[in-house]
Image: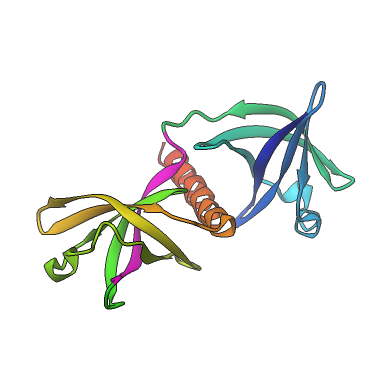
Amino acid sequence: QAMGLSSLIISCDEDLTILEGTLIKLENFFVFKPNDISLAERIEMPDITNVELVIKDINMLNYYQIELEDFIDDRFYISSIKLIPSTNTFNLLWDLDGIIYHPVNGKEIPMRITRLGGDALSFSICDAQDMDIPYYEVLRARVIFEDHVIDITGNIVKSYDLGPYRYFELCYTDILESRRDAIYRQLFRKQIELRKAISEFR
């Protein structure tokens, strides 16, 4: 029984590999079949420090801690899956740089992204001159990560003022699945970093 789209997140010391694939439930165990076999074959089982599984629902990402038993014939064999409880794994509070492009004159307006998710992001702008962004226009935006940039389009669905800043919420429109997956990959990485930091702090 296939359980739909999922990702296996494999940590080996400092390295993180994200394998997209399909999870299949058999009688007493699970099998994960990766889409990219060549990427999976590079992983050495003894080097693995942590493995998590993410199952994509329509509007949710569910994270699971798993027991990985073996990798045979291009498949990962999993003996147990345990849900990692989380209030909201679908978006993260995150302080990122970005650019929003004014729809009329194309001017690049710097923005601070405060929350990032698979279908929307929140950002703030400080300069009062740039706050006249129209709601009804589809806007182009760029999210700047440490090692990657992702271009998206979206509509402003709400805004509010707080001190010298105006905060906006942007819902993506017509986003390519490859770009949404690229955002997910960044979210996975960030979430694992945060969990590591929290466990070390404890």
* Residue 115 seen in the figure: no
Q: Position of residue 92 (x, y in %)?
A: 40, 46
Please determine whether, in this image, residue 142 is positioned above or below residue 44: below
Magenta segment: does it hold 7? no
Q: Is residue 190 left or right of residue 123?
A: right
Looking at the image, which residue sits at the far top? 27
Magenta segment: does it hold 91? yes
* Residue 97 seen in the figure: yes
Please determine whether, in this image, residue 124 is positioned above or below residue 8: below
| Residue at x 57% of width, y 54% of height | 181
Q: Which residues, given as a range, are shown in magenta?
A: 88-103
Of the 4 image quadrants, the one containing the N terminus is top right
Q: Main secondary structure of the magenta part?
A: strand
| Residue at x 25% of width, y 53% of height | 168
User: Which is more toward the observer, 67 or 116?
Assistant: 116
Please determine whether, in this image, residue 99 is positioned above or below residue 27: below
Q: Position of residue 73 (x, y in %)?
A: 90, 46
